[in-house]
Image (cartoon, coloured by chain):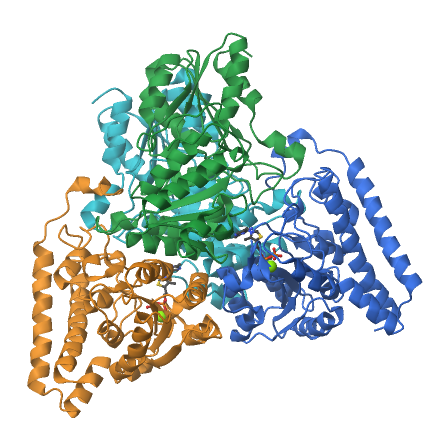
Chain colours: A green, B blue, C orange, D cyan
């Protein structure tokens, strides 16, 4: 069901959970405080509707809870685990990476792990270095995992439903800064068409800007400003970082001949490098300029307001990169 | 206890109380942002524990850290400036409330990760054992950290290696919005410590005297190289989990009940009763605390904003 | 115990023993490679525990997994083929010794990570509670896993949620080259379980009867929905930590002492004494086991090598 | 001290530990079984020489042990922790990434963390999916950490000594497959010159091959074969993956106009992407062909002999990439 206009990103997540729980009794929700709705209400109402057997508060034991969800998934349940912040996934990577991601392959195809991990990420509000990271690049490096990062309210719900229905472990990353955003108009999104496909958010001819998560709206703002000066960027949102829809990205760059990759993670070692490597290979002969990357400086996330603002790339960062790509200073 | 000790303990508690009330006020006025966890109601634990510590004992804290930092001798001005993101804050505005560091007074670091500082404290204790016999490390954590594997791993190593370490559990009955009974059947950190042959006791954390009594031998034991102890303090946070949390998960009656056990008021009553304090002295101590905090607020307000390019500086030594 | 049960238990133990001896031989001949951990000397635990399990009870193992897989009903041919990296092995040659999976007989997975399967077993137990009341999950782990946080976190959740789960600790006194006393003051897994109100007992793991006696009520408790138990079996591995380990860290006398407690010989002696077995039957059971293992070796030797491009297939469902 | 000719990689590590322990009483060694030498003897003899106070066996508690070492480093000790396999660093990433890597920055420069973590990585011997990963890309994405990956016996010692002397947390990655290798000749390497500097291992004019860890020797073998057919590749070893010596890499590609990046990690999300992104930006106008990457397929490490052989890139993989780069099929 496409969420109504005016639905926030957070409500869309909540609705998607509810719909999947209604559709499939094997969908279970687990996490800290999920039975009371979690810190922002993403799981609000679910315990009341589906009972605390299916909406399970867990102790603060991230590693074990993720392992437990994997074990339940091996038997055919479809757990949706909330790791409050992706910063805390550091506590669960043995289970997620060594076990969850590998069991299908290691078992020679005998096992499968239909698990979804929802987690908040990204910078907002001065929460500092332990509640603001963007660690998607780590997980996109792990064979057996899928990594999804929605950028709009409507798509958040559709992508989450697709993630829950997927038979593989999926890391589903929600930018806290998007939680209270709404889409300009309700976007009809089918569940099936989302996972593994990129989406062109704004067509343009001059430069392709591949943006993820909250950076998509940042790129769209940059597009407005650039358009005013006659530069038309094409904004493409990969939506799924692993697997990656290279075709859509490459088609865009083949057209524009120039590309900027924008994410909120620190640039060094970020998913941008992977995108650059794949794109330059796919469209080498079309490239009129090196592919540029926009992201955070190589530093932990600072807490103070001004430092935080300096840390997060904004539309000016994108505009500067686009101009540089076009050879205009 | 002598008059001076009583005054000094009360001084610490009032300073924390006044500081936290100011933080709450500045947050409401949007002068401070971030994720703030106040320890109003838990002051006796910080004050009692730190009263046994010297500047070069090494303290680690949790996400609810302001009181610990002040009790260890942290400067309220630099602490508040840090919360306000200013360049003259302890961390130059980079750390914020959950990542305060004031090593000059032996306050090593707070953490945004539940249980995250417990292993770190072990390492500082190892350092003390090897290089500064007589010095100790101390770590504060909440009841929520009891179910983190790192806590158990740390109890094991601390006891095995006889580290000069004091574990202080501030068991306030809740982890975020969930009562401890929903997280474990083992509602006492002291039960965990006992398995590892770590001397331990659970006390009323709102009774400053009880905490003092529990901590004194534990600190002595660590100082003399006999190994770690764990002191568990049953207490209560009077405000929400974080500033802005409406605390719907708690009954008003529960709050009322704990209000009547306010650790500051209780100590004041006891001290007056014991002839260690009179009303005038009490008023003076409170007033002094409040004026220190006002000065801190001015300091923070007037503090310079960090330079923009500090953002990418200071990542490496 | 009746004759048939005795024969069946002995059958399992001999099968494991013969299998492991064959693995050792094939490894020496370079027909199998990899990192192999043999359980020779620990057969009674696997045999006793699995004798109470049905095919659809869900078993998790450690890095020392061969015996657990066989006791659960795993096919020695497909197991050996897996160790040899063949396409007809359980995992098509992708898993190897530390990553065996035979879900068709309820053997979920082994792991190369100490303690790694404990949380997984909780999840399977949750599934049983929700969907298959009466079915249970079981996890084997070594004494080394006792100091992994995941073990403690798992005890807590299993007891809190009353999961139908049996924890089996094979406490063989060593983690790699280090005796347990160098890792912890708490040398018994059962002490940990007790804190969490989990019924627990420590038994002589080389005494099949003692293990049977301990496991029976624990399995019954889990099946009837009353929650987890932990059975700790004190045992000894007769070979090195891994094949090739010269075991210099152990005294020969220690090995000799444990040799005299060989669980297979002890059970045979008891069963003959109790009139449940005679020498001829014993010989027949052992011979049958050896011939099964020979057949397995042929199966593995003749098994096809996996196709080269299988390497990148089967990563996703 | 430069190790004598005939010294193995493992002996070089062992000597470096001994020399640093002799030079600085603050150097402590911690890890599972380190007091008896560890699984291969990397720490052999140290407990006897320096005592079990400085060579400390730890329980199997990777997360806490790394945290403990950070805490000790904060006070001025220089712990060298052994995490037996990098696969198990998954258990210690909260401590290493959230605390060890960030404390200097978060504290506004008040603290420092002179910590070294030694760890084995890479494929060899059929050990399978939990003892064979190459996870350097994760750590190179973490601000505050350094990541070092030696490729020769002599350099292993020099780089390790430099890592121990460095005032930052350093992840030092040792490929098990190199442990018993020796250098053809003793290479005089000064400690000072190593960290943060790449090294040209073989000069060439046609294609630059940037190779890491064990892939350096693989690339050198490929170079021999290619040379026989008249193709001269330049083999460059970054040695330190974070920070990265882009200048040396870029200078090489400016000369050759073509580049192949070779590592043992899976290609997707590997450090190769970062190298491609930085290089194409630095030398865009010199590039005559897209930069290619050689690495493992996107799969966990299989255990079986033939599958394992198919998994690890070898000299043929490099030769194929070099030819493709040169436009020869
Ligand atoms: C590893 C981790 N998981 C989850 C969180 C989110 N979180 C922040 S505080 C908290 C509850 C902590 O409770 P407790 O330890 O009792 O401390 P208190 O807040 O009561 O002082 C949680 C779950 C976190 N910060 N770290
Ligand atoms: C997390 C982790 N750390 C270290 C290792 C290396 N290692 C393999 S087996 C082992 C000892 C395990 O001892 P125990 O659990 O008692 O099992 P046992 O080998 O005695 O059967 C160690 C340290 C590992 N596999 N996993
Ligand atoms: Mg609490
Ligand atoms: Mg053992």
Quick check: can you spot residue B19? yes
Q: Percent position (x, y) of residue C136?
A: 29, 66
For residue D222, which quarter of the picture? top left
Q: Which residue is drawn at 49% across and 10% down?
A: A231
Using the image, determine if residue B249 lies above or below residue B260: above
Q: Which residue is drawn at 54% across and 76% down?
A: B197
Q: Nearer the viewer, residue A109 or D277?
A: A109
Q: Percent position (x, y) of residue A303?
A: 63, 39
Q: Which of C12 and B208 is in front in this view?
A: B208
Task: Classify residue C51 as left or right of residue A91.
Answer: left
Q: Which of C136 and A241 is in front in this view?
A: C136
For residue B126, which quarter of the picture? bottom right
Q: Residue at x 86, y 56 (%)?
A: B286
Q: Which residue is drawn at 8% across and 81% down?
A: C283
The extreme right residue here reads: B280
Using the image, determine if residue C174 lies above or below residue B308: below
Using the image, determine if residue B305 lies above or below residue D89: above
Q: Percent position (x, y) of residue A53?
A: 40, 57
Task: Classify residue D235 as left or right of residue B277.
Answer: left
């Amino acid at each position: 069901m496409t969420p109504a206009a005016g639905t926030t990103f957070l409500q869309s997540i909540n609705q998607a959970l509810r719909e999947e729980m209604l559709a499939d009794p094997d969908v279970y929700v687990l996490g800290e405080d999920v039975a009371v709705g979690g810190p922002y209400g993403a799981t609000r109402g679910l315990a009341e509707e589906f009972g605390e057997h299916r909406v399970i508060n867990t102790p603060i034991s991230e590693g074990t809870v993720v392992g437990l969800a994997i074990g339940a998934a091996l038997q055919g349940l479809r757990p949706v685990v909330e790791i409050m912040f992706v910063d805390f996934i550091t506590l669960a990577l043995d289970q997620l990476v060594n076990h969850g991601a590998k069991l299908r392959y290691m078992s020679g195809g005998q096992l499968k792990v239909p698990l979804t991990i929802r987690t908040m990420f990204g910078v907002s509000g001065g929460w500092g270095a332990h509640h603001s990271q963007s660690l998607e690049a780590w997980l996109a490096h792990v064979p057996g995992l899928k990594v999804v990062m929605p950028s709009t309210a409507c798509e958040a719900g559709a992508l989450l439903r697709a993630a829950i229905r997927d038979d593989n472990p999926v890391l589903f990353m929600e930018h806290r800064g998007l939680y209270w955003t709404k889409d300009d108009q309700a976007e009809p999104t089918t569940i099936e068409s989302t996972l593994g496909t990129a989406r062109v958010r704004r067509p343009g001819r001059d430069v392709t800007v591949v943006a993820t998560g909250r950076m998509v709206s940042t790129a769209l703002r940059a597009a407005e400003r650039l358009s005013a000066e006659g530069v038309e960027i094409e904004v493409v949102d990969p939506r799924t970082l692993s697997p990656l829809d290279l075709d859509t990205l490459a088609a865009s760059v083949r057209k524009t001949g120039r590309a900027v990759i924008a994410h909120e993670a620190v640039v060094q070692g970020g998913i941008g490098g992977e995108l650059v490597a794949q794109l330059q290979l796919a469209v080498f002969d079309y490239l009129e300029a090196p592919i540029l990357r926009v992201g955070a400086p190589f530093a932990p996330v600072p807490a103070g307001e001004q430092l935080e603002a300096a840390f997060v790339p904004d539309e000016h960062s994108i505009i500067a990169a686009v101009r540089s790509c076009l050879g205009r200073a | 206890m002598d008059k001076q000790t009583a005054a000094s303990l009360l001084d610490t508690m009032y300073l924390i109380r006044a500081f936290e009330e100011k933080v709450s006020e500045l947050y409401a006025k949007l002068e401070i942002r971030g994720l703030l966890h106040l320890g109003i109601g838990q002051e006796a634990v910080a004050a009692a524990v730190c009263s046994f510590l010297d500047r070069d004992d090494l303290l680690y804290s949790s996400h609810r850290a302001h009181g610990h930092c002040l009790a260890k001798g942290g400067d309220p001005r630099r602490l508040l400036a840090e919360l306000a993101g200013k360049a003259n804050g302890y961390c130059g505005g980079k750390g914020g409330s959950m990542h305060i560091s004031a090593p000059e007074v032996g306050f090593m670091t707070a953490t945004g990760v539940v249980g995250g500082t417990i292993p770190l404290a072990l390492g500082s204790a190892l350092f003390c054992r090897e290089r500064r016999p007589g010095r100790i490390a101390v770590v504060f954590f909440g009841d929520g950290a009891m179910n983190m594997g790192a806590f158990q791993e740390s109890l094991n190593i601390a006891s095995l290696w006889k580290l000069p370490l004091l574990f202080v559990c501030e068991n306030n009955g809740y982890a975020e919005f969930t009562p401890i009974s929903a997280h474990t059947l083992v509602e006492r950190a002291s039960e965990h410590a006992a398995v590892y042959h770590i001397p331990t006791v659970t006390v009323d954390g709102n009774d400053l005297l009880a905490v003092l009594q529990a901590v004194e031998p534990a600190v002595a034991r660590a100082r003399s190289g006999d190994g770690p102890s764990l002191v568990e303090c049953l207490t209560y946070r009077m405000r929400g989990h974080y500033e802005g949390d409406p605390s719907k998960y708690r009954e008003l009656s529960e709050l009322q009940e704990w209000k009547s056990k306010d650790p500051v008021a209780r100590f004041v009553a006891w001290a007056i009763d014991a002839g260690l304090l009179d009303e005038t002295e009490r008023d003076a101590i409170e007033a002094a605390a409040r004026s220190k905090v006002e000065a801190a607020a001015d300091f923070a307000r007037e503090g310079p904003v960090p330079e923009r390019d500090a953002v990418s500086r200071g990542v490496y030594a």
